[in-house]
Amino acid sequence: MYPEELAILANRIRRRDLQAVFEAGAGHIGGEMSVADILTALYFHTMSVDPENPLDPNRDRLVLSKGHTACILYVTLAEKGFIAKRDVATFLKPYSALNGHPNRVKVPGVETNTGPLGHGLPVGVGMAKAAKLDAAAWRTFVITGDGEMQEGSNWEAIMAAAQFKLDNLTLIIDHNRLQQGARLAETINMSPLSKRLEAFGWAVEEIDGHDMEQLCSALSPETVTLDRPKCIVAHTNKGSGISFMSDRVEWHHKVPDAEQYRQAARELGEASN
Amino acid sequence: MSAVTEQVRGNPALHDCRDAFTRTLEAMAAVNSDIVAVCNDSVGSSKLGGFKEKWPERLINVGIAEQNMVGVAAGLANGGKLPFVCAASCFLTGRALEQIKADIAYSNTNVKLCGISSGMAYGELGPTHHSIEDFAWIRALPNVPVIAPADSIETAAAAEWAVSHVGPIFLRLSRVGVPDLFSSDHKFELGRADLMREGADVTIIANGVLTHRAMFAADLLSQSGIAARVLNMSTVRPIDAEAIEKAARETGAIVTCEEHTIFGGLGSAVAEVVVDVHPVPMKMLGVPGIFAPTGSANFLLDEFGMSPGGIAESATRLIDKKA
Ligand SMILES: Cc1ncc(C[n+]2csc(CCOP(=O)(O)OP(=O)(O)O)c2C)c(N)n1
Ligand SMILES: [Mg+2]
């Protein structure tokens, strides 16, 4: 898919996510909008995965460590064919496989259960190490939130990945500058993320996380540095694509009312045309 | 709508105990400048907004870093502060368990661990966010009383008591609405069960969001001529062994109800006493050792046999097993 098509698809995914959150009356819409382009680029450009064979040993792995944005992962998996599109409507419903955080036991395409922040990267290190042990070509991608990088477990994993020379591991930090209750800068500031990662021995690339061309290029195997794990610091906006949500902390997990829903849908619809 | 919500429809006042907790915390912080709140990007979910506004420098937000949060609290206590750690119970107890063991329990540090939105309060967010192992984990540690208040009034009383008690505690709070059960002058006493209702046929022991369900169950049972005693056992450790022994001897059957796995929680704590002093038939209601399916807390409690009707049914069946 070309970058322009990917951008249109990402907005369609945003649109479906918005509807699911509105109908369920819960979700983490801000972080879902900010990660939409990253997920779309991974599933429809970069990763080699087969919905018909979700456990293919040679598949690329994705761990959505910021598991609170599960809904948009479900929408993306449905778009890709891992689950039925109609299943998205069961989000958060009693006995649905689609609860508020992804569950690999119930949802094909999910690699590991996330929800508590700071778990995905250590698991990703293990995956990448396994591929190295087998001299296999598959790659591992982990997406974390920027607030999530405050968890110490991430930095333990960052040290291990560098030590193990895991150039088959890519960490994408969704750097929207907001966490749950406030800006990172007013909580525990993590910037400059790139300098910190570089100091830990990683190859780092900073990109506009809403620019499909930059995403596709940064994710491509040609931009990997031999023997070094890669971190993509993706500069994003929480609530991206919806004007009144963009860069506003309260939209971490607020749910739009009917009027806000209509406006948001309109904005996303126009962007997809 | 869950059965219990329906039952209290006539009594519309359901309270989120977090409100009583932070109201009390702020009142105490106003007169005790050593009180500090420690949190993990949880100002909103712990309802610390008012505290932050009044005493921004005494609100210590370490970011999304629970292990650090508990360690920092231990250090603050060492420096003479009185830290109330306020964080989602699942992350506080799960993520920082070793810090709780070494820095709080073993070091016997004067830190108040307040597990917010415990049990299955996070409902549809799923098992990662359910805190249904915290009784078991924390009660396995020496020095840390484990307390799960049943309503707003007991929450406020326990929070007030926490300030006067020197040493660590784990206060397990919910966000699921519960009606007021106690009178406003209720005093919290560590390790003392409250006799909520007298009865001689069977005893129902509960705490937290289950106590009012147990009382509704007792109402239902009385309609079929069964007199159920109800004990609110908010302190899980140290457990009120005397009240349990009395219940075993006088009623001959005990049902326990908890918003927790049945492995190692309130039911287990009660059974540890019962087998020791006066064995009687027991039924332990709780999460039956599984990761819960998707659903709200009240929905799941009903599903796991803890609707008032479900509890009453278990009690009736248990009575048949009495010697
Ligand atoms: C260990 C842990 N602590 C706290 C939380 C509660 N929580 C859920 S999302 C969130 C904020 C995450 O911020 P960030 O990583 O920046 O994600 P994004 O902005 O992409 O939503 C918090 C604190 C959690 N899920 N896990
Ligand atoms: Mg963020």
Image (tube, rainbow, N blue to C red):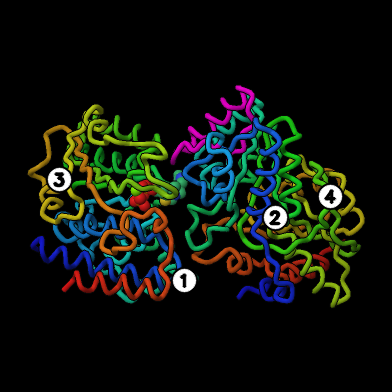
Q: What is the CA distance from the residue labelled 1 to the residue labelled 4?
A: 39 Å
Q: Amino acid at mark 4?
A: Ile
Task: Judge left or right: residue B193 versus residue B2.
Answer: right
* The residue stretch that appears in magenta: B59-85
Question: Tag 1 or tag 3, which sits nearer the N-term?
Answer: 1
At numbered mark 2, what does the secondary structure look like: helix, strand or loop?
Answer: helix
Task: Between label 4 and label 2, give the one nearer the viewer.
Answer: 2
Q: Residues within 10 Å of mark 3 (few under 14, many from 20)?
A: few
Q: Which residue is mark 4?
A: B244
Q: Residues within 10 Å of mark 1 (few under 14, many from 20)?
A: some
Q: Is residue B46 magenta?
A: no
Q: Which residue is mark 3?
A: A137
On whether disc 1 and disc 2 are found on a single subunit, the reply is no
Q: What is the CA distance from the residue labelled 3 to the residue labelled 1?
A: 39 Å
Task: Name the residue: 12% across, 66% down.
Answer: A5
Q: What is the CA distance from the residue labelled 2 to the residue labelled 3?
A: 52 Å
Of residues A219 and B87, the one nearer the viewer is B87
Task: Between label 3 and label 4, give the one nearer the viewer.
Answer: 4
At numbered mark 3, what does the secondary structure look like: helix, strand or loop?
Answer: loop
Task: Judge left or right: residue B211 versus residue A178.
Answer: right
The response on whether ligand 1 sits within 8 Å of label 3 is: no
